[in-house]
Image (cartoon, rainbow, N blue to C red):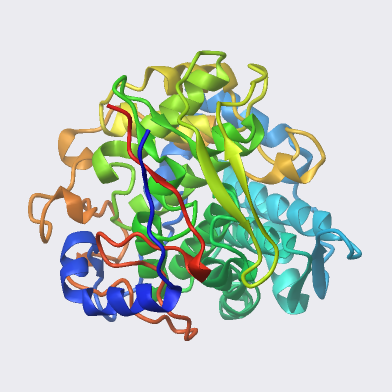
Amino acid sequence: MTFVTSQISRRSMLKAAGAAGVAATALTAPPATAAGTAFAHPGLLHTGADLARMAAKVKAGTAPYTTGFAKLTANRHAQSGWTANPQETVYRGSGSPQNYATLYNDVHAAYQNGLRYHVSGDTAHAETAVAILNAWSAKLTSLAGSADRFLAAGLYGYQFANAAELVRDHPDFELARFQEMLSKVFAPLSDDFLVKHNNAVVTNYWTNWDLTAMACVLATGIFCDDRSQVARAIAYFKDGEGLGSIKNAIPVVYDDGLAEWLEAGRDQGHALLGVGLMGTFCEMAWNQGYDLYGYDDSRFLKGAQYVAKWSLGGDVSYTANTRRKGALGGWSGSETASAAAGVDPAMTRPIWAMIANHYTKRRGLSASYVTRIAAKSAPEGGGGDYGPNSGGFDQLGFGTLAFTRDRVSDTEASPSPSATSSAASGTRPQTGGTASPAAGQDLAATGSNGLVGWSAAAGITAVAGGLLLLRRRARS
């Protein structure tokens, strides 16, 4: 096995990225939303067409939508009249008075009530969701704790944005105040993590840490109509330094068409979390015209297939790797993963329906392992259906209801022939809303919060602080 290493400073990397900006943009930048226009709303995990489909299918008594909706209505978080318990400061992590369970329970109650409103038409659920969201935006001012505060920002930031997107046009919803909360409390922590990684070696944090932050930055950027924020998130997905960018999260593509998921060398639970988060990221981007599902020859599909086969008890290849750990200028060490971890075939998360339906129904591709595990996991529930601890609330869930699809036409499943460059530009036609992609934005641009852009120029391999990130070539 051959390792490719590079050792340059973050400052040198950013300087090189700036010098190569024009060329890199041509190679890697998806078209940005046209200047002066908002993003499509609703347009995070669910579009208006998605919500209308769910309502129509449930009203018609169509399976499996009906069983998916039954999972939703049975969840205690989906009941109208849920009373919020907002906090001024939310703490997550050791050494702090942890109260973050209050936040994730309320976030899921808002989301589930918002979703139930769209399917049933019962306005009591919309009013409940609005009341929860307004209560939090009126009180929350900060997230604190150990490094786990970054997980809180990432997970609950993207989830909060999705819950609010379902009721953003409700007359009683305090939209501007909620946007301010997302922009000042959640997004800055996630933004900062992707730049500084909590002042640690860039590989110190596993894949799912990056992906939580990426999901938050993308979701809050769309919700707040911040085009530069969305552009930075997409650039990081493609070329970010950390282990959440797609070629670091899925570092090896094998001859059998499967692609190694890096955290399979850690444990099954975190690998499932990561796949779910990357799928969430791709779905939100898709609904704004960016095809990251198909990026790099559908690399995500190959990684999801790998995790699905492995989680079903199948044998998968794993290429040994070493990642550096520690603080910049302080303690350092390394950790080697040499094989995929053991699995419990009974373990599941509500992540598979979204992925399976995209590739098999939108795209008409084969996804045998993903399809099998999606069927095994159905009907998917949501927060509160997978245990009381935080891991059971990492995904919004209800994919059987939300993502079951009919086969769509080829024109709906493929990038537009009139897109600005080629399929590599990562775009597809818009399916609704007010946004329409337009050519040309430098994705390494500084965002509205003043943080430096994250992505390296095409072809540069780099790590922070002079420590090595070991890059691997697929075995011949």
Residue 269 pos. (x, y %) = 65, 34
Of residue 86 and residue 242, the one placed in the foreground of this image is 242
Residue 439 vertical position relative to residue 139 in the rendered view, above or below: above
Residue 280 pos. (x, y %) = 48, 47
Residue 147 vertical position relative to residue 381 in the rendered view, above or below: below
Q: Is residue 424 left or right of residue 240?
A: left
Residue drawn 42% across the image and 80% down it: 447
Q: Is residue 220 left or right of residue 82?
A: left
- The quarter holding residue 87 reads bottom right
Of residue 8 and residue 115, the one placed in the foreground of this image is 8
Q: Is residue 204 visible?
A: yes
- The quarter holding residue 233 reads bottom left
Of residue 110 and residue 306, the one placed in the foreground of this image is 306
Residue 429 pos. (x, y %) = 21, 52
Residue drawn 18% across the image and 72% down it: 440
Q: Is residue 307 left or right of residue 251?
A: right
Q: Is residue 397 visible?
A: no
- The quarter holding residue 89 reads bottom right
- Quadrant for the C terminus, please: top left
Residue 29 pos. (x, y %) = 24, 64
Q: Is residue 439 left or right of residue 430?
A: left
